[in-house]
Image (cartoon, grey):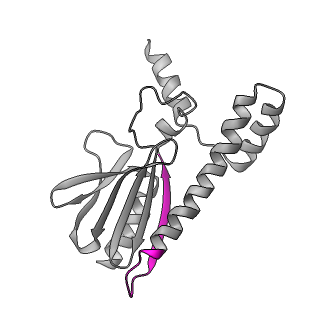
Amino acid sequence: MCNMDKRLLSMLNELQYSEEEITSLEKEANESINIDKYYVKNGELLKKLTMQMLEESVRKELQEGEKIECEILVEEGSLVNSKVIPNIFTAGATFYYYIVLTNTRLRIKSLDCYFKKINEYNVLISSIQAVSRHKKMKNVYGITIDNNYIQLGSTEHEQELKNIIEKLK
């Protein structure tokens, strides 16, 4: 594969869709193969339902005096848009990170392309050593806890989380 093809594939994998684009794609899907419509409609519906369930479960597990400062669902752009291919090469891969920052701890749930929980981290804010970019992948950031690096996804929300964590420390 030439460099041009690799660059084009990389750009296609990074696509993100707005609500208007999804509506337009749904309209197109009505006139095309129904599998397109299935992924557009059911994918978004599944994401919203999963977010509601995650929010409810986190709220139930809050300790006394603990309050939520920030909730984010981070999509891994390079993987999210490839989920239309059956999970052939990405078994166990993280497609989404659900990140909840409370006044005392950071909770991270990593989810696969079907929104099934893969990993869960629950750490005290005081034990976070750093929020930083990945050494080898410039678009990825994470946190360092007890000299272990936990990847949190793309750099889109890095500054927001960094500021809130610094404020809470």
Give the quarter of the figure containing the N terminus. Answer: top left
Give the quarter of the figure containing the C terminus. Answer: bottom left
Identify which residue is drawn at 53% across, 28% down: 86
| Number of marks | 0
Name the quadrant containing residue 163: bottom left
**Does the magenta portion include 149?**
no
Q: Nearer the viewer, residue 57 or 96?
A: 57
Give the magenta part as a residue range: 60-75
Spot the residue most to the bottom: 65
Identify which residue is drawn at 76% across, 25% down: 33
Identify which residue is drawn at 66% across, 50% down: 45
Residue 158, image x and y in percent?
40, 58
Name the quadrant containing residue 166: bottom left
Residue 155 vertical placement versus 5 (above, below):
below
Residue 164 vertical placement versus 93 (above, below):
below
Q: Is residue 113 left or right of residue 163?
A: right
Q: Nearer the viewer, residue 80 or 155?
A: 80
Q: Nearer the viewer, residue 20 or 94?
A: 94
Spot the residue most to the left: 147
Residue 76, image x and y in percent?
46, 44
Residue 144, image x and y in percent?
23, 58
Q: Is residue 164 left or right of residue 72?
A: left
Identify which residue is drawn at 50% across, 57% down: 73
Spot the residue most to the top: 1
Residue 102, image x and y in percent?
40, 75
Residue 35 vertical placement versus 18 (above, below):
above
**Does the magenta portion include 68?**
yes
